[in-house]
Image: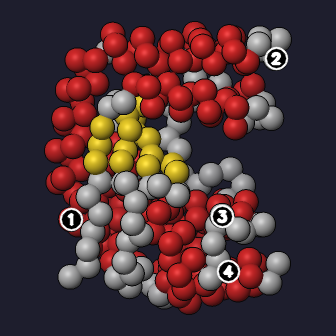
Amino acid sequence: MNKYPKIKLVDNPKQDAQLGVNFIKLHKGSSRKHLSRFLPDELLDVLDKNIPAKIRDRRVRLYALRRHRTDHAKISRNLREIKKDWKRVEGKYFRLVDKIFKKHPWPPGKYVGYTTVFWMYPRNISDKTFYFPYRHRKAHFANKTIAHEALHFIFFEYVKEIYGIDWKKEKSYGRLWKLSEAFNTAMENWTPYKKLFIYGGTPYSGTEEMTKKISKQWSRQKDIDKLLDKWLKKRIIKS
């Protein structure tokens, strides 16, 4: 039997505060319109280029810490429900991923998910940590986010082990990231996966055509190696 990771779901206000700070720094070249999708209205003014970085970071941290403090009861209650909800589907999820990746072993790591008050759910491929919404207008949406991030972890591990492509050393990482997002979306719209998590996936901007092609490939032949052969050998390894 394949050994599955134990995913811990926790609330860590300081971790979430740092997420907000890091996200803005990482996307400093992005447009205000893009960044505003992930921040509350009361923080939009920190995107002003004239605001010093120290003041911006302090504002973002204070916002996150205050939200975690004032909404502590709600966050704790929702987190308990999210844990129960994930436990309901995790076994089926891991068995489904076994089918997709031919029972390839999961990579080692922390496998910790952190609640966030922001509207951004990034992941750290190296240590296997990620963020998920403590509340969402769609019921069970946290489950979909948890599964999505975990799918990234095994995707990059599989690509490394089977194709010899280490994302940390890959010069064309941007294309590999797009492929991983397109692959995830295609899987999320695959009927067995979609039934488990209720909602299908929406392609990331710039991956729409790639997602369509992968979905068609998977519908014709559900073989991860034959699918990835058409993308990795031609577009990553030889580039």
Distance of mark 4 from mark 2, alpha carbons? 39 Å
On residue 49, the disc is: 2
Between label 3 and label 1, give the one nearer the viewer: 3
CB under 8 Å between callouts 3 and 2? no
N-terminal of the pair, mark 3 or mark 2, is 2
Do the residues bearing badges 4 and 3 touch, measured as CB atoms within 8 Å?
no
Between 232 and 171, the one lying in front of the other is 171
Which of marks 2 and 4 precedes in the sequence? 2
Q: Residue under circle 1?
A: 91
The image quadrant where one finds the C terminus is bottom right
Q: Which residue is mark 3?
A: 168
* Mark 4 crowd level (few <14, some 14–19, many ≥20, 10 Å Cα): some
The correct choice, above or below, for 47 with respect to 82 in the image is above
Amino acid carrying label 3: it is: Lys
Total marks drawn?
Answer: 4
**Residue shown at 49% from the left, 62% from the top:** 152
Question: Badge 1, how many Cα within 10 Å: few under 14, some, many 20+?
Answer: few
Q: Position of residue 100 (x, y in %)?
A: 40, 78
Q: Which badge, 4 or 1, is on the more N-terminal residue?
A: 1
The answer to which image quadrant residue 194 occupies is bottom left
The amino acid type, in three-letter code, at marker 2 is: Lys
Q: Quadrant of residue 1?
A: bottom left
Q: CA distance from mark 3 to mark 2?
A: 31 Å
Q: Which labelled disc corresponds to residue 232?
A: 4
